[in-house]
Image (cartoon, rainbow, N blue to C red):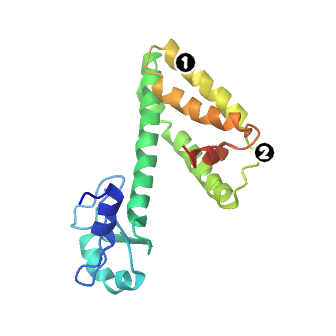
Amino acid sequence: MRRTFKEQSAIALSAEINGKTGGIFIQPRGGRPDPRPGHYATVFYAGSRAIFDRHLSTLQAIAKNSVYVDEKIGSAATLDCAILEAYYGSSLAFLHAAAMCKAEGLDPKIFFSHKSSFLGLVSVTADAAQGMVERNDFSGDQCSLDTHVAAIEHIVRLSKDARISARFPQELLENYKRALSEGLGRQELPAVFRTLMRD
């Protein structure tokens, strides 16, 4: 019988085998990895919290950073994919930004030397988005979605003028404009969350 990815993950990660919860993903940490076995990875677990706690010392022999997520089957795989999506999406963003700099004659190393600027913006926005998503209230007085869309339109134009791929910023623009079409232009940037909750 063929199973979906989520079903396979749930079986592999959340089933109890010999009284232990199943683990999901080994993810290298940022910076220089710790060479000691089990110290360079994070493993997420789902299933029984009691069983996880009972065998935590054993699980930490596999990965020191063993993290319990939730009892719901598949939750560990969901968190794993969510973190990877944020990683891949942000990586593509800064690589496109570096390509834009190079195409315009600006050494990409100058852009990368300012990584604290865009990483700081991402961190602040993520913190703000968390509260807004929890409250389902995206109102604010920082910067409207209308203003962000105008900025992204400029990025698309600059990408085309520089003769580099504009696919990534164009995709961003289409997602943000979709939120505008639903009357969210005066809301804060995280209001896009509402349109992403459905196809």
Name the residue rendered at 76%, 48% in the picture: 140
In the image, residue 41 above or below residue 175 = below
- Position of residue 187 measured from the top left corner of the image (x, y, whole percent): 74, 43
* Quadrant housing the N terminus: bottom left
* Quadrant housing the C terminus: top right
In the image, residue 125 above or below residue 135 = above
Q: In the rendered image, which residue does mark 2 sit on?
A: 141
- Position of residue 166 measured from the top left corner of the image (x, y, whole percent): 48, 22
Q: In the rendered image, is residue 5 in sight?
A: yes
The circle drawn on residue 146 is none
Q: In the rendered image, which residue does mark 1 sit on?
A: 158
Mark 2 is surrounded, within 10 Å at the Cα level, by few (under 14), some (14 to 19) or many (20 or more) other residues, namely few
Q: Residue furthest front?
A: 1
Q: Quadrant of residue 146?
A: top right
Instruction: Tell whether 106 sits left or right of 17.
Output: right
Instruction: Tell whether 73 sits left or right of 130.
Output: left
Name the residue rendered at 28%, 80% in the picture: 20
Q: Quadrant of residue 2?
A: bottom left
Name the residue rendered at 34%, 87% in the picture: 54
Q: What amino acid is labelled 1 in the image?
A: Leu
